[in-house]
Image (cartoon, rainbow, N blue to C red):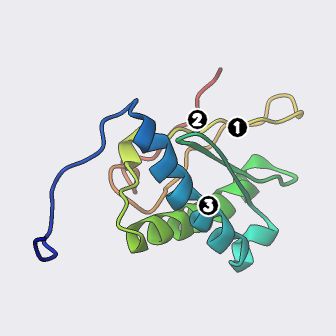
Amino acid sequence: MSGIFAVDIGVGQGSGLSLVLLGLYIGPVLQLFSLEPISKEVQLLSYIDDGTVLTQSTHLVQNLPKLTVAYGVIYRLLMALGLVLEHDKSEVYHFSRSRGESHPPIDLGFAPYTEDTLLGPKLY
């Protein structure tokens, strides 16, 4: 038996083990997120390895600060577990029943979606 040592090897996508490991990591993230104050205004859902952050307000622009805070919490939780949140794979969809409401972009607080390169919403 060898001693403990660092290994820089991942589990292949589609591997049967990857879903088991994902469940072991995502469960605590969902539980810990529910303990955060922002979870009273924002919901975190997960289907396999796709996460969704939901919130509602009277106007879309009111959602942006809530989503930014929630995204930061999720990022810190994943980092604490040794996982990586790939910011460039993030997407935003805005939904509103109001006709003519603008679709504001969001500053997630993490590159590449900050200041000059905001994350813009998808139309469909």
In what element is the residue under mark 2?
A: loop
Q: Residues within 10 Å of mark 1 (few under 14, many from 20)?
A: some
C-alpha span from label 2 to label 3: 28 Å
Would you say the residues marked 1 and 3 are in contact, meaning their CB atoms lie under 8 Å apart? no
Which residue is pictured at 16% across the width and 75% down the height? 4
**CA gap, disc 1 to disc 2?**
6 Å
- State the quadrant of the N terminus: bottom left
- Direction from residue 59 to residue 68 in the image, left or right: left
Q: Which residue is mark 2?
A: 121
Residue 104 against residue 7 in the figure, above or below: above
Which residue does the image show at 39% across and 56% down from the upper left?
Answer: 114
Report if the CB atoms under discs 1 and 2 are less than 8 Å apart: yes
Secondary structure beneath label 1: loop
Nearer to us in this view, 60 or 5: 5
Which element is circle 3 on? helix
Nearer to me, 37 or 16: 16
Who comes first in sequence, dot 2 or dot 3? 3
User: Residue flagged by tag 3: what amino acid is it?
Assistant: Gly
Q: Residue furthest top?
A: 124
Dot 3 corresponds to which residue?
Answer: 27
| Residue 105 spot, x, y in % from top left | 56, 44
Q: Residues within 10 Å of mark 2 (few under 14, many from 20)?
A: some
Residue position marked by numbered label 1 in the rendering: 94
Identify which residue is drawn at 37% across, 60% down.
Answer: 83
Tag 2: residue type? Pro
Is 106 left, or right, of 84 in this rendering? right
In the rendering, at what x and y percent does residue 62 appear? 75, 58
Q: Is residue 124 above or below residue 67?
A: above
